[in-house]
Image: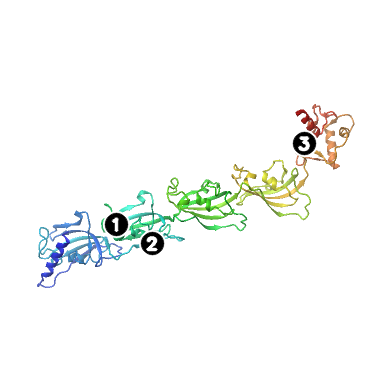
Amino acid sequence: MISNSLVVWLQFLILCVSSESGPLEDVVIDRYDIPKICPREVQMGDFVRYHYNGTLKDGQKFDASYDRGIPVAGFVGIGRLITGLDRGILGMCVNERRKLIVPPHLGYGSIGVPGMIPADATLYFDIILVDLWNKKDEVQITTLEKPSQCNRTVKDSDFVRYHYNGTLLDGTYFDSSYSRSSTYDTYVGSGWLIKGMDQGLLGMCAGEWRKIIVPPFLAYGEKGYGTIIPPHASLVFHVLMIDFHNPKDGITVQNQVIPKDCKRRAVTGDYVRYHYNGTLMDGALFDSSYSRNTTYNTYIGMGYIIPGMDAGLQGVCIGEWRKIIIPPHLGYGEKGAGNSIPGSAVLIFNVHVIDFHNPKDSIDIEVTYKPEVCNVTSKKGDFIMYHYNCSLLDGTLLFSSHSYENPQQITLGMNKVIDGLDLGLTGMCKGERRTVIVPPHLGHGESGARDVPASAVMKFDIELVHREEGVPEGYLFIWLDDTPENLFEVMDLDKNGEVPLEEFSTFLKAQVEEGKGRFLPGVDRERSISDMFINQDRNKDQKITAEELKLKTEEEADRVHEEL
């Protein structure tokens, strides 16, 4: 438009020329397009930016801001505009369109503008308001959506990650973090942002949506920014706070559910098996052990996992649930991890501890019932029968003897069961009940077994239902007293100088009946007799002679002599 100094001079001339022909006309205003939402209207002293087309009565254009591609900017009501425009813009909303008819005495009067506007010309303006602010304005904040739970809000010196859409006040887009598929990451209150954004982000929760309107003097001011933000432009940001932290933050542990019977807490060096869901602060899932249907297994406090998780698992109980919030400097830092964890991301792990142990652990025994009379207890070599339920520490039942017709039976110390159970069954009375906790190195180890996960701690509820003395390893039959003298003569019942299988069997069974000997328990007696007979029948003629018969001790002595 015409320069401001010329406008002031022309308005002075107009005021000096009084009209004696009667009342003067005022500006005619046609509000032909009004936005549905109008939070604010132009008042005296406001700064406005607007586009216009200016024509004369015959439609001839005398000026247009569109031709220059830059809106007109200025204060309203302080004499910088012709009086008709000052009056015509009052009460406008951003994005409102008006047609103004400005009579000569409120325009350029009887002088006009040489070469552009004739004397006494009525002016026609088609105006759209694109921006509006006042020097007294502050940052305007509107909360659009806020999480129901908000334990912490943004403060100065926090590092924030947020998405935003940036527009001018009339809705013109100028920038968006979404277009880059990356959050905007920065410190708050450290001078890295425009002042209005520094103020607008304070007090936000993770997951909160805000609309932040920043007046130009708290944004890019008179210069604007490049070609995308004009001078004197108000800025509108729609912000979604993804997460934030402070460089001084440690881990945070929340929502603990601790079992009532927690007897032990994990410490450095323990091996922990746990399930987890890992999310970002906005709830986006980045990993889950449940999706792999297997626990995450690791030592804690030894650097095998990120520092925040190492610290967050300290002190957990078996069966405990907890939420662990980890700032990025204790997580994956500025670089993030893969495509699922962005740089500088706060991580949230919802953890369920399945079990833990220490490589130095032995079994743990809790006696739940013991008979009043208990004179003899189980030991290595004893034949025992027992019932058991075997489960994981989370209660998952793995095996049970009750699923079968008869109790489980073994000879203790013969490597027939895992070491931890063998130890747990030792020293029991008949009728005694125990709970035995077996660490994996005394169970099925790092490889696991059928239905037993790798490195799993197992729980056995056992009851000893039968115990009898065993025999030394490698023996099928032992004498309870001294071996009879002239053993072959005693065994040769019909005194014919040879002992067939039937006679051999009759003799051994009689020794047991008389309490003089004992068979290996838990093994079919007839099979034991047959195996012993085959061993003594050295020439395989179906009978044993005096020369063939040797006790096991004599066989071992001969074997040593042969080796020597």
Does dot 1 land on a helix, a strand or a loop? Answer: loop
Within the image, what quadrant is residue 410 found in?
Answer: top right
Q: Which residue in the protein does label 1 denote?
A: 220
Q: Position of residue 512 (x, y in %)?
A: 83, 41
- Asked if the residue at tag 1 contacts the one at tag 2, i.e. Cβ–Cβ closer than 8 Å, the answer is no
Q: Is residue 404 visible?
A: no
Q: Which residue in the protein does label 2 denote?
A: 143
**CA–CA distance between discs 2 and 1?**
24 Å
User: Foreground residue, 494 or 394?
Assistant: 394
Left or right for 418, reference 195: right
Identity of the amino acid at label 1?
Tyr
Identity of the amino acid at label 3?
Arg
User: Foreground residue, 494 or 321?
Assistant: 321
Q: Position of residue 74 (x, y in %)?
A: 22, 62
User: Foreground residue, 16 or 541?
Assistant: 16
What is the quadrant of the C terminus in the image?
A: top right
Instruction: Single out the mark in the foreground, 2 or 1.
Output: 1
Q: Which residue in the protein does label 3 denote?
A: 527
The residue most toward the right is 495
Q: Is residue 512 visible?
A: yes
- Asked if the residue at tag 3 contacts the one at tag 1, i.e. Cβ–Cβ closer than 8 Å, the answer is no
* Marks 1 and 3, the one that precedes in the sequence: 1
The residue sitting at 88% across, 35% down in the picture is: 485
Left or right for 369, reference 201: right
